[in-house]
Amino acid sequence: MPTSIPLGAPIWVDTNSPDFDRDLEFYTELFGWKAVDSGKEFGHYTDLRIGESERSGRTVGGIVPESPNYLNASSRWTVQFYVADCAKATKRAEKLGGAVHIPPTPVADNLVYSMVFDPNGAMFGLFEPLDDNTGLGAGKELHAPAWFEYGYDGVPSEAMRFYADLLGWDVHVPPWTDSKDPRPYAALSPKDRFEEFGGCHAAEGAERELSSQWVVMFAVDNTDEACAMAEDLGGDVVGPPVETSMVRIADIRSPGGAVFGVMADAS
């Protein structure tokens, strides 16, 4: 098992696409990713990597053509969390109020995964690696997953109670949060590690009309330039750049319809 990723932390991200070739070109141009196709046997699931070449690159996620056997849902980015036993964790998720979408499924000799809806309807994955090379090879660096944000129309700490019980997270209010906020922001970290990997915020405005969801955010040099480039490549900026807690963030929709975030240090 990958020792550099703590149990309960994000270990993989991927997206499905109804317009695979166009989306693959979009992402590789936007982030400079290299693509490695696993072949017909695995439904042309494609690893996305950063580095000098496809084979020597480090994985930052994956993309797969839309298929009824995959998510059977609209195009989206999905985060999967590291568990020691996928079958046990999936059963526990059900007991805690989750709904299983894809039961524990082995993939070759590399991993076992399942897909689950949390009690608020947000999809996520449970991921049990079976070797040291399975999982994210890069994180919190340029063009790699840097943050995982959950939007919820309610009190963030209440939404995260399910995950804390399931995955052993520490859920805490960061010091920069407004003490007068009736629904304070919740920061997330693996149990006893104090390495924040994401957070949950109370939805506001038009976001309150959306279902609860996880958004995968990728690090970029400049948020505004990334948004402009995304539009040139056929994507849409659905959440214009804003500054919050020392970072500048934005939400982008790929040509195939999957929404993800980009973030950079605030200037």
Image (spheres, grey):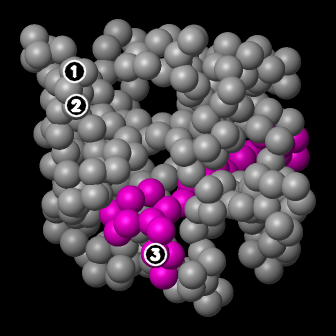
Disc ID at residue 3: 3
Magenta stretch bounds:
1-28
Q: Split into 4 quadrants, where in the image is the C terminus?
A: top right
Which one is nearer the viewer's eye here, 167 or 204? 167
In the rendered structure, are the residues bearing label 2 and label 1 in contact, judged by CB atoms less than 8 Å apart? yes
Q: Position of residue 110 (x, y in %)?
A: 60, 83
What distance separates the C-alpha of mark 1 from that of mark 3? 32 Å
Disc ID at residue 56: none
What distance separates the C-alpha of mark 2 from that of mark 3? 27 Å
Residue at x 87% of width, y 62% of height: 54
Q: Secondary structure at mark 3?
A: loop
| Name of the residue lying farthest toward the bottom | 109
Q: Which residue is mark 1?
A: 177
**Residue 189 belongs to the span the image colors magenta:** no
142 vs 170, left or right, is right
Q: Indicate which disc, 1 or 3, sits on the residue closer to the N terminus.
A: 3
Which one is nearer the viewer's eye here, 215 or 169? 169
Q: Amino acid at mark 2?
A: Pro
Disc ID at residue 174: 2
Q: Secondary structure at mark 1?
A: loop
